[in-house]
Amino acid sequence: MAEQAIGVVIERLILFLAEEAVSIYELRDQVESMQEKLGRIRCFLKDADGRSARNESIKNWVNEIRQVAYDIEDVVDNFLVEVESYYNRKDWKGKAKKYANKPRELVERLKISSQIEKINKKIEGITQSRKGLGIRGSDEGGDPRRESLLEMRRRDACEDREHDVVGLEEKINELVKQLVEGEGRRRVISVVGQAGLGKTVLARKVYNRAKSSFMSAAWIHVSNNKTKEVLRELCKAVLLLPGDRDKIEPQNEGEMRESIEKKLKEEKYLVVLDDVWTPEAWDGIRGAFPDGNKGSRVLITTRDGRVAERSDQNTPPYRPPLLNEEDSHKLFFRHAFPRSPYSCPRELESSAKKIVQRCGRLPLALVTLAGILSGKEQTIQAWEDFIAGHNWDLTQGNHEISGVLALSFDDLPYSLKPCLLYCCAFPRDSAIRVKRLLRLWIAEGFVQRQGSRRPEAVAGDYLAELVDRSLVQPCKRNCFGQIKSCRVHDVLGQTLLATAEEQNFFKIYSADSKCDLLKCRRLAIHCCLEQRSPPLHLARAFISFTESESPNRHDIILQNFKMLKVLDLEGVRSVKELPSEIGDLVLLRYLGLRHTSTATLPRSVKRLYNLQTLDLRTSAGVRLSQTKVSLKLKAKHVAKMTNLRHLYFGSRSRGELFNAMEVPEDFGVRRSLKELQILSYVKAGGWVKKGLCTMTNLRKLGMQVPKGYGSGSAFGAIAELSHLHSLYLQGELQDLPTDALKNLTKLTLDSSCLGDGPFSGLQKLESLKSLRLINNAYQGKRLCCLGGGFPCLEVLNLENLEHLEDMVVESRAFGKLKYMRIASCGHLDMIPQGLENVKSLQELKLIDMAARLVERVQPNTGKDWPKIMHIESIIFTTSAVEKEFDVGQLK
């Protein structure tokens, strides 16, 4: 991590020299000298970091370097806070103030010069002490094998490569049989064993194979979550109310248990409770699982045998064994050599055998170390250096795992270390939304543009590599296989959390662990703040995860944030307004107010010149104005935010039209938003013709077309956006010129009232991969998909088309369709004619459809079954029934 800190500081110094117009030659010389010295030190940090755990003197040397890096960052940021606003003012008042403050700026430059001189002397002392510690230099050249793997990961980013369970196929089949067959009473089956045995992966395999045999199925992470939190997740999963928090959260534990029990009483259900820590955790939720004598099952994974004993005394637990030697090698090879046939080169067999033996046949250790070695050169020297370069004093139990995980962290490229540590700021076992995570990395400066590649693309590579190294686990993927949410394994999270707090990377503020916040550089809030908190002058990030409506002390604590880059209050509904001091955070790059109760913003937001992400999708429908920024958004407020990349407005409830934002006529006309990549949701207006076309980097647009608005100007502007690939249009459209849409890969039309003509034009789009028609976007009774139409479409979603009665798929239509979803189309009586010819279709969902259609798709007996029996996964629901079929098991 010291290597990473130095790397970030060097990049900051380069930007400081290039962008801040350092005009005093003495200061420029000092900064360049510092940059050069840090570069030399960095060459020795790889060796020092690897040996610091075994040598207290080296550990102290590394800590000194890290602190120097922090000191430099503080000096530079303090300087920028003092003078930043004067560089960015463009009006005549700003220029006048800039010249009026020249003496103040000169004082600040002299101050930073003095501080840098002191730091330079400290660096010289650190450099001299290195020689006495015997720390060796390292080759800073790029690793061609790692670059090759990165390229492979970019190509394979959409593949779902879940880790295989080796040597347990017979047991998986046995557990599936226990779940779907046997006695009618509710049974609780437990998988018990130490951390790292692969209990969760095993349970996931079993769950995926068995869930189609149950009317309701849910997967819940328990860990150390409180009973109320677990019950709330059960409510969301079992009651199918993922978006209706207000119907769940006001309930107490007893009411939630009763609601779940009432829903499950008449059903055959399967619930997996992953990582149950204590018998008391099971006692708190067991009342939610009724025994209706219908063959229901609960599957538990736990490290504590007492949990299994208490949950079901009549069903013996399964204890996964350690792998045998053959299976250990097989699992290791699959991850160390991730391309089929997963074979080990003969010259590496001896080295591989040593590593497998030292992993103690533990799956997590094998997978983790294999992930490290997959990124190294496949040479004897590289592998033997790895074996010789680490402390292998690993004993049976949790120490073994933490030791292996420490190796995996130490071996990461310095650019990935802060990204992985950042994941641990999120509550344990929580699913982390990937888009949010990547933007936080970018805002913190962990990810930089690489040549012509955008930071967002580079951040995606970082995530892919962490997944490939088995350090981050995908939770959910979209229809294209891209990761939507992820998490960090609980055992790894504990190891990383200790590292993060030891190195002052961030602190967790929770009810259980009070910590010294005075020198905190990043703060993650996991409980309500106390009324009195120390000033956090050094903090760069403030992320709150409290969802309670009880008042928090954000208004007080924000007044002390001067160097903040990230302020993320997503989901904190107690936040109703921000203090006027928010405008003083001139270094702020990320402001997240999603799902808060913020209805107004202070006028001072116009001073946030460095902001990259502004997320205003609040529950209150935020408004911006001249005084307390009521939104008809004053363009002058945003015009100065020239670094904006992601701009989210408005709000949307499930099943309702989104609340789009009105923007003024001159929105974007001065090319002030040329860096913008995402803009949603806004109302079309006079700004579109002159302003939208200036947003030349726009990639995603969500726009509402008001009734009576001529859509021609909108499509004219859209046609000029060569990078635009995702478009969401809401409102009645008079026409749909396909020339303007030819570059799109994803299109959503909402309430568009299209007829046959415009729909026929859509079928000719050769780049389109995803199409959603919702809320009467198509108003015809018969939908005809022409032969050869939609040549590249992979995802089709038809939802709430009230007039649709019939659908025909002609031969050679949908040549690449994989996923099809039809929802709430109440007049559709039968499966689309010709669907049997779409052989590429893998999944069909029929959600909230008429009972007469559901009757026609019953396996083997339904009239439409022959049309869909070739599809691997079929899910259909009415208001009372949800059913999923694994067609492979039915055949």
Image (spheres, helix red, strand yellow):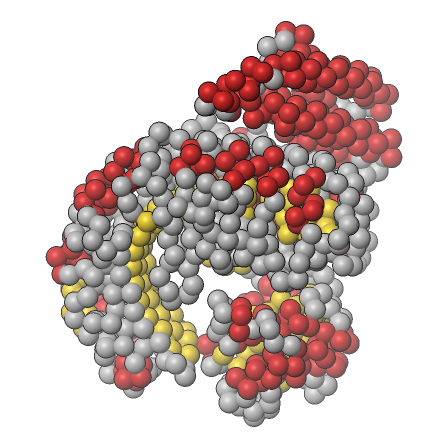
In the image, taking residue 240 as reference, residue 553 lies left or right, namely right
Measured from the top left, where is residue 377 in percent x and y? 59, 34
Q: Height in image: 741 above or below 255?
A: above
Res 517 seen here: yes
Measured from the top left, where is residue 651 in percent x and y? 43, 56
Res 131 seen here: no
Q: Residue at x 32, y 73 (%)?
A: 824
Q: Residue at x 72, y 21 (%)?
A: 41
In the image, taking residue 279 as reference, residue 172 lies left or right, namely left
Quadrant, the N terminus: top right
Q: Height in image: 203 above or below 153?
A: below
Measured from the top left, where is residue 151 in percent x and y? 46, 38
Q: Height in image: 124 above or below 455?
A: above
Q: Nearer the viewer, residue 573 or 3?
A: 573
Q: Height in image: 494 above or below 144?
A: below
Residue farthest to the front? Answer: 627
Specify the quadrant of the image occupied by residue 677.
Answer: top left
Measured from the top left, where is residue 808 in percent x and y? 17, 68
Q: Nearer the viewer, residue 396 or 543?
A: 543
Residue farthest to the left? Answer: 757
Specify the quadrant of the image occupied by residue 473.
Answer: bottom right
Quadrant, the C terminus: bottom left
Q: Residue at x 49, y 30 (%)?
A: 449
Q: Residue at x 18, y 51 (%)?
A: 736
Q: Nearer the viewer, residue 735 or 826?
A: 735
Question: How many numbered marks does the figure carry?
Answer: 0
